[in-house]
Image (tube, rainbow, N blue to C red):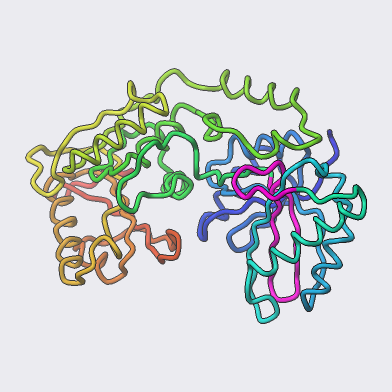
Amino acid sequence: MNENFDIIATTFFGLEPVLAGELKAMGASNIQPITRAVYFRGNTELLYRANLWCRTALKVLVPIRRFNAYNDKELYDMCFRIDWQKYMAVSDTFAIDCVASGPIFTHSKYAALKCKDAIADYFRDKRGRRPDVDVEYPDLRINLHIYNADVTISIDSTGVPMSKRGYKVRQTVAPLNEVMAAGILKLTQWNMEMPLMDPMCGSGTFLTEACMMAMNIAPGSYRHFAFEKWRNFDRDIWVKLKQEQKDLRKQAPGMQITGFDRDPMALDVASQNIQQAGLEEFIDLDRRDFFTNSDKFSGKFIIMNPPYGERLEDEDKMVEFYKNIGDALKAYYTDCQAWVLGGNMEAIKKLGLHPSKKIKLFNGPIECRLERFDIYDGSRKRQF
């Protein structure tokens, strides 16, 4: 139980340093950030804790074999040599997720098929029959990562990606990923004391993630994980960690968290998600049009993910839309710190505000910029 082993946590591009910081705070050792992932070492308790508490990880994987394969036969042979009885029984179901890049293995599904055949043939030779595949709810989920000839086979301790917290019952068009939302909040270094507002809240992801952070709610507390089906699952450790996260939860966020949207359907979706998370008592929602709002706000931490790309197909409309965002921020949100996630590099320049910070991110396949704007009332400056 106390023996350390290699672990890989995957994430989005741009969030690697944030995830590394989370893992360091949990006691991980030998932390090595790479592109879209962080390598580290830890024991079984840390593996469970990372799944329960990491806000910016997508998957937590345990590598069991690394090797080189230059063709499908070598891939099959090396997969076949693994002692799969250490990880599953012939009566268990399994599934394989594969990411392959490079000139050798150009089709990830074919590589996954060769690995699947190797595992099935291994059990046929050892136990006289093959285990079944269950792509939806397997007892063991296996991750196959191939880059050129480099192959890493890992056991997936997470299952459904950690962005699926378990509180979203409905979604709006192009919703923000929960892991991305949490990562953005951490990148802004929001101090969890300044009142937070999302004036284009959509399905309420920023609001929910912010409230969970402020109340120290473990993001994995709403769901189950793949390791709970493992043959060597340590229930005592998991029960202890689940009780610990309940004890660490704060009773209230300690500041006001507010979301606006002009779309009543979006507000209804956000309300349902927030209720599912059990946070409706702590988050205020109101129907308001960001561009025609008559009230003025000051001293707020503004976080927003305006529509872009697929949601605003006309380039001229998008440029005008972002210009109007800048005008509204200057008119109604003076003495505020505003963070805007933009997916169109030209449009975000039309905000008419000078960013004090720019951070490059990828929201799925879309390259984005997270930009900070300190909005002052005339010449009076507020230090955030």
Up the image or down, 133 lies above or below 47; here it is below
Q: Nearer the viewer, residue 95 or 226?
A: 95
278 left or right, relative to 47 = left
Q: Which of the two residues, 293 or 157, is positioned nearer the viewer here?
A: 157
Task: Give left or right: position of 344 versus 167.
Answer: left
- The quarter of the rendered structure image containing the C terminus is top left
Q: Quadrant of residue 148?
A: bottom right
Residue 91 point in image, percent of width and height: 79, 40
- Does 362 appear in magenta? no
* Range shown magenta: 132-156
Residue most extreme to the front: 128
Residue shown at 82% from the left, 74% from the top: 73
Left or right, 74 with reference to 277: right
Question: For the N terminus, which image quadrant?
Answer: top right
Residue placed at 37% from the left, 57% from the top? 370
Q: Residue at x 63, y 24 (%)?
A: 242
Q: Main secondary structure of the magenta part?
A: strand
Whether residue 135 appears in magenta in the rendering, the answer is yes
Residue 379 image offset from top left, x and y in percent: 16, 51
Determine the residue located farthest toward the bottom in the rendered image.
Answer: 103
> Residue 8: horizontal and vertical position, in percent?
69, 52
Q: Nearer the viewer, residue 347 or 84?
A: 84
**Residue 39 percent across, percent down from the top left:** 70, 54
